[in-house]
Amino acid sequence: MTLKSVIIASLILAGILFANDIKNLGEKLTLNESTAISEINKAPESFLGKTVLVEGRVIDVCKKRGCWVKIAGDKEYESILVKVEDGVIVFPVEAKGKMAKVEGTIEKVEYTLEQTKERAKQKCEMEGKEFDEAKVTKPDVMYRLRAIGAAIEM
């Protein structure tokens, strides 16, 4: 075996050993072209009910049931919440910090004023801040991705 053959074989073996494993969750991904999270955030109403594929780094994971993840967007400080039916897909906590592709449908969640106040109160409690109910004057609206399948580099 020549030196060149040994080097090539070594590089191939190293690539195999250090390649990231892909963990597929839920249904198989069907879309090939991803939609930028910034595009969805810029005009979420135009994506309602549409199936999209998003890509990005997992920045947070539900620690209780693995029922949601937050994916970083293509622009700084942007992200999208990805929600699944409880138990249908379980996102592993170890996915945090890993790259992911997620396919699903964009949906709109509208909260009542009372629900919005309760959510704000819980957030303040988690952050150790004082809650001022008077500052919550209108109901929240949230857009998220209802996932049917995901592929995470583990």
Image (spheres, rainbow, N blue to C red):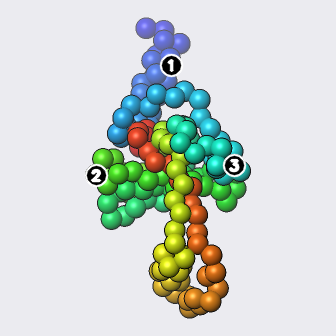
Q: Residue 68 in the image: x percent, y percent?
A: 42, 56
Residue 122 in the image: state x and y as whole percent: 47, 80
Q: Which mark is first along the chain, 1 or 3? A: 1
Q: Considering only vertical position in the picture, is 13 above or below 37? A: above
Quadrant of the rendered structure where residue 23 is? top left
**Amino acid on which the number 3 mark rests in the picture:** Ala
In the image, 112 versus 57, the foreground residue is 112
User: Please, which residue is most extreme toward the front here?
Assistant: 112
- 88 sits to left or right of 33: left
Callout 1 touching callout 2 (CB < 8 Å): no
The amino acid marked with disc number 1 is: Ile
Could you tell me if residue 86 is visible in this image? yes
Q: How many other residues sit within 10 Å of disc 2, few (<14), some (14-19) or many (≥20)?
A: few
Residue displayed at 52% across by 72% down: 112
Mark 3 nearby-residue class (10 Å; few <14, some 14–19, many ≥20)? few
The image shows residue 81 at horizontal and vertical percentages of: 52, 55
- Is 68 located above or below residue 149 in the figure? below
Badge 1: residue crowd in 10 Å (few <14, some 14–19, many ≥20): few
* Numbered circle sitting on residue 95: none
The dot on residue 7 is: 1
Kindly tell me whether residue 55 is visible in this rendering: no
Residue furthest out toward the left:
87
The amino acid on which the numbered mark 2 sits, given as a three-letter code, is: Gly
SS at mark 3 in the image: loop
Q: Which residue is mark 2?
A: 87
Residue sitting at x 39%, y 51%: 84
Which disc, if any, is residue 43? Answer: 3
